[in-house]
Amino acid sequence: MRWIRALSARVEETAETLGGKALGLVVLHRLGLPVPAGFAITTECCRAFLRDGRLPEGLDEELVTAVADLERSTGRAFGGPHRPLAVSVRSGASVSMPGMMNTILNLGLTAEATEGLAAETDDRPFALSSRLSFLTSFASATTNADAASAALAERPGRQAENEEASLIQSIEAVENLVLRRSGRPVPDDATHQLTQAVEAVFSSWDAPRARTYREVNGIPHDLGTAVIVQRMVFGNRDGHSGTGVAFSRDPNTGENVPFGEVLFGHQGEEVVSGRSMTRPLRELAEREPDVWAGLLDALRRIEEHYRDACYVEFTFQSGELWLLQVRPGRFVGGAAVRVATELVGQRLIGREEALLRVSPLHLRHVRTPRIASAGEADVLARGIGACPGVATGRIATTADGAVRMARTDPVVLVRPETSPNDMHGLAAATGIVTARGGPASHAAVVARAMGKPAVVGVAGLVVDHDGASVTAAGRTLPEGTLITIDGTSGDVALGSPRVVTDAADEHVHRLLAWADDVSGDHSARDETQRLEAAHRALRDR
Amino acid sequence: MTWPEARATDTGLLVLHALRCAGTISLARLHAITGLDASDAESELIDLGADGLVTRLPGDIPGWSLTDAGRAADAERITHELESARARERVTAAYERFLVLNPELLDLCTAWQLRPVDGVVSVNDHGDPDYDARVLARFADLDRRATEVCAELSAALPRFGRYRVRLTEALERAAAGQLEYVADSTASYHIVWAELHEDLLATLGLRR
């Protein structure tokens, strides 16, 4: 085939043609790890689409063939009324552009196929909720609208009496949104859904936001993205299903223990979006020991392949583990130093490679103050570190409260999210925590402008400003409670745990001793100079 | 289709609504936000204070803010203004277009503050003029697209016209080398943009 490659261990092409994500899936195949069957549409096809404004000649036929192969290998029918096949459609460029492009889940769940899935699983709410995820992701990809907000914000829980009725209502709301915003209904034909989804992913390469990202980061505009189509695995299938992300080592410290988050009973996008209640990865060990064992084995084999820490996205359906994405860990700061030196200890890399993997910038980040260790501190919740540094202060739940309290004591302002109405509170606080929002949220941008440690997107954190308290992980803390936040790791801890600036000292010393051996210069200089001298010596060889 | 000619918002409501969208602010900022001269703005504040709608907070930086009654009064008056201009549909449409631009603006502010170097996201020390110029060029591009949204808004309700003036000023100052006008100063592009966002939510009676 000209435009499509089935994903298997035998694929020979480079990231330039297949994109980084598809290439990662090929690696997983080669390692014999479980990957849902699928195929990639090449970046060349994307370039043709962007040039001509339409999908190239011949792609339609190739899609039919590729889908037929998937139907055969899965024993399912795409959009069919019995044993329906649903697929995910994801972007995957040769360079990472996080969050810039579209993903569509559960594609192929037409109204009829949804009933087929309901009959097959004897679980109509599951089928309806899967169809709703399809429609929401399809709407976001094709209309530029935030479709999630069109669905009912408050979903009744599973087994609730009105669960089905509420899902049906949300499905109609999203269908209406698509009709209103794009002037045409969501196609109720699986093949047309797939074509439109492929076009939407290709088009998203040229969305202004993606262009801006490339412009700012010096990425060429003419690379294009690949599209990955895979058989869907359902993290929302039953009580033994879920989804998660995992690092083979702790990205905050570099310590050799798996680290990540898991979301039981949900599908992939929800864990990445940070909108839902995720649990620490280790809970998987207790609840799904077989999945956990499979994951540990996979992380070990992937590490040996990359000879580096790694990151995976995974889903488990009815107790069966599937890997959906993989890449090297790309750790920074002290974590990068620790991983590089420990990999030498494990004989996975040599000393020279360890030196080359650590940039002088990592060394500068090593000295950022950190909460001593998550084990020692009483960590209340974890979000996304948005501005590095540690802040200790008393909880204020309103901007006015922060200003008032800050007259006597340092204050950490804790808000659901921030708006201009909170500016005086942000100015008065020594640190900032928000329950919602990501690293580019209003709170994050303002915190960095003011140089204040900040943690954003703390899922599960509830701020009750009327009751003047915050609740996380089942614990309710009144306003005025002393907390400490770490703007690197995103940890929010109770009280004032020990703070260190030398967390990775031992590893830094070991690495720099190797650096001096390589450069032959053992004089007293600052750490960055010692590493740079070693880099120069290695490059000149 | 014709709409009733949208009238200028009365100065009392302008002041009230500025506090609603910008939080606790000084007289100088109130002047910058509304364009009213300082003595007019102050006399409005005193009248609104007498009605119990605004209050002056003491402290190192004295500022004015809404009382709960002021917040309720603003919501009522601003909704009334929207409905009598029959502008809800147009403002809603503009808001939806604003929401498409909003994530990009926040990306740009982040790119202005943080920069990946050797895979490490570091504080942008503004030591690389080429990088800053690239980011500012994208701000200018985004701003051109925002112009259409601003024009739709001020056609619907003239008071929205102040945002165009303030965004332009922030961008011009940033381009002239006053880098704090991107995301740091209270008159920066990011702050003005965030106030516009808050204004749209308040005007349409929506929550974030």
Image (tube, rainbow, N blue to C red):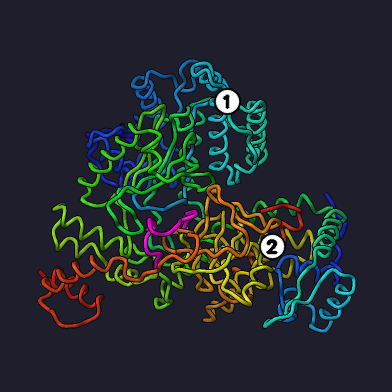
Asked if residue A20 shows in the view, the reply is: yes
On the rendered structure, is B29 left or right of A114?
right
- Alpha carbons under labels 1 and 2: distance apart: 43 Å
Badge 1 sits on which subunit? A
Residue B198, position in %: x, y? Answer: 69, 61
Q: At 80% from the left edge and 72% from the top edge, which residue is drawn? A: B15
Residue A224, position in %: x, y? Answer: 39, 48
Q: Is residue A531 magenta?
A: no
- Give the mark count: 2
Q: Amino acid at mark 1?
A: Pro
- Nearer the observer, A400 or A45: A400
Whether residue A500 is situated above or below residue A293 in the rendered picture: below
| Mark 1 surroundings within 10 Å by alpha-carbon count, few (fewer than 14), some (14 through 19), many (20 or more) | some
- Pick the quarter of the image with the C terminus of chain B: bottom right
Mark 2 lies on a secondary structure that is helix
Give the residues in magenta.
A370-384
Residue B130, position in %: x, y? Answer: 41, 73
Whether residue A513 is situated above or below residue A208 in the rendered picture: below
Name the disc covering residue A473, or none.
Answer: none
On the image, numbered disc 1 is attached to which residue?
A: A125
Give the quarter of the image for residue B95: bottom right
| Mark 2 surroundings within 10 Å by alpha-carbon count, few (fewer than 14), some (14 through 19), many (20 or more) | many
Mark 1 lies on a secondary structure that is helix
On the image, numbered disc 2 is attached to which residue?
A: B150
